[in-house]
Amino acid sequence: MTNLTRDRIEASPGFFKALVDGVPEAIVAVTPDGTITYFNAACERLLGYTQAEVVGRNIAMLVPQQPDRRADAMKWLERWAHEPDETQSRFLDLIAQTKAGKQMPVDVRVVERKIEGERRYLITVRDNTARRQEQAAFKEAHLKASRILQIAEDGIVSTDATQTVTFFNLKAEQIFGYRAEEVLGRQLSTLLPERYRYRHREEVARFGAGKVASRQMNERGHVVGLRKDGEEFPLEVAITKVSVGGALTYTAHLRDITQRKRQEEKLRESERRFRAIFDHAFEAMGLLAPDGTVLEINRAGRLMTEGQSQLIGLPLWDLPWAGSDLEPDDSARQRLKGAIAQAARGERVRYTADLRRGEGDVRKIDISLTPVKDELGHVIYIVPEGRDVT
């Protein structure tokens, strides 16, 4: 068979009819006034009509006018048929109606052609119910996620690959003093003091080029934010990145830690004051666990021992000074042990004991044991004090 013969067979009317009837795409041909002239087998399967039921009738039976659209379907088809060739490949969303009366979202594409000198609109139709459902599900999921992020306890700021702000939640508004619309579209560096901007931008870019998906920005030092009113403040920042369709997005979770820093400084100041009082007190003082183990002992308490340097971690009754009583039967040590057990039960104990500091040097020591309780009433520490009352 020659190429000429093959071309002649493939150009026959029978070939094209078989082709159009056999393709899986639903195809409808209509006149400019909307009269249906052709309805292929795929259309019959999609909409439930036979060709005999629709040929000669208006296409409005297949795509009735919708309440939310003032123009009828034929007007839409006519408009799109006259679009330039390069735009005719785009699909138009319409609502079709099956023979059973069910409405079906469809993608429609239309071109105008002349067939034996007569104008015809050639329309391809495909069911996009699944795509619409996927879009609706995605939109709902995106809306839920957006609402959750909006009311999150952390400030959340997202940017694109150029570090332009694309999302700014309510907590971020409270932290920085900006409304979202004042920040969206601006550079992330707007939220940082001038002296940190270049370094921060470079760090984010390196993070974007690396393999790690998330990290704490505070790993290399404090992050300092800048409020709208010009106030600088400390931030705790965790950053993540995600690439969707080749587009990189950064998302930062922010916490204003101003109060935490103030509290930490107050604790440090409290510790300094405690140390100043504790270590320079004339009375011997210490801090015990409820079982009597020494956790802290001050300078005056150490001076009352017999020179042993390692006192922390020993039971109080086993310290050198605690057992140096005149009584040979070890009753002083046992008395102290019993008093600590009383204090561990929540009782405040006070008594006087004898302490030998050398040959013939016996001191009267006023000992008190004060329990320290937590908010539930459990003893968590015992404070021992010793005063020479000789």
Image (tube, rainbow, N blue to C red):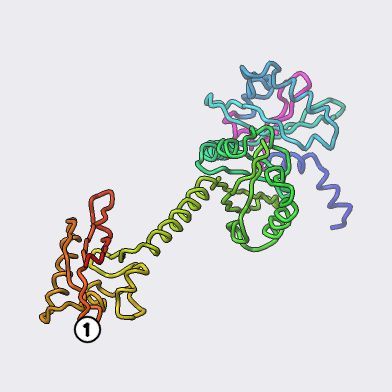
User: Who is closer to the viewer here, 85 or 371?
Assistant: 371
Asked if the magenta segment contains residue 40, the reply would be yes
Q: Residue farthest to the right?
A: 4
x and y, in percent, of residue 146 in the image: 56, 38
**Residue 238 appears in view:** yes
Q: Nearer the viewer, residue 62 or 79?
A: 79
Q: Secondary structure at mark 1?
A: loop
Residue for point 62% across, 59% down: 221
* Location of residue 334 by image quarter: bottom left
Residue indicated by mark 1:
359
Residue 232: quadrant of the picture: top right
12 lies left or right of 108: right
Question: Which segment is the magenta one?
Answer: 23-49
Is residue 69 rendered to the left or right of residue 84?
Answer: left
Q: Quadrant of the N terminus?
A: bottom right
The picture quadrant where one finds residue 136 is top right
Q: Is residue 218 left or right of residue 36?
A: left
Looking at the image, the residue that sits furthest to the bottom is: 359
Q: Is residue 158 above or below residue 389?
A: above
Q: Residue 64 location, x and y as percent?
A: 63, 20
- At 69% from the left and 18% from the top, the residue drawn is 72
Q: In front: 248, or 358?
A: 358
Q: Measured along the vertical axis of the image, is residue 368 above or below residue 143?
A: below
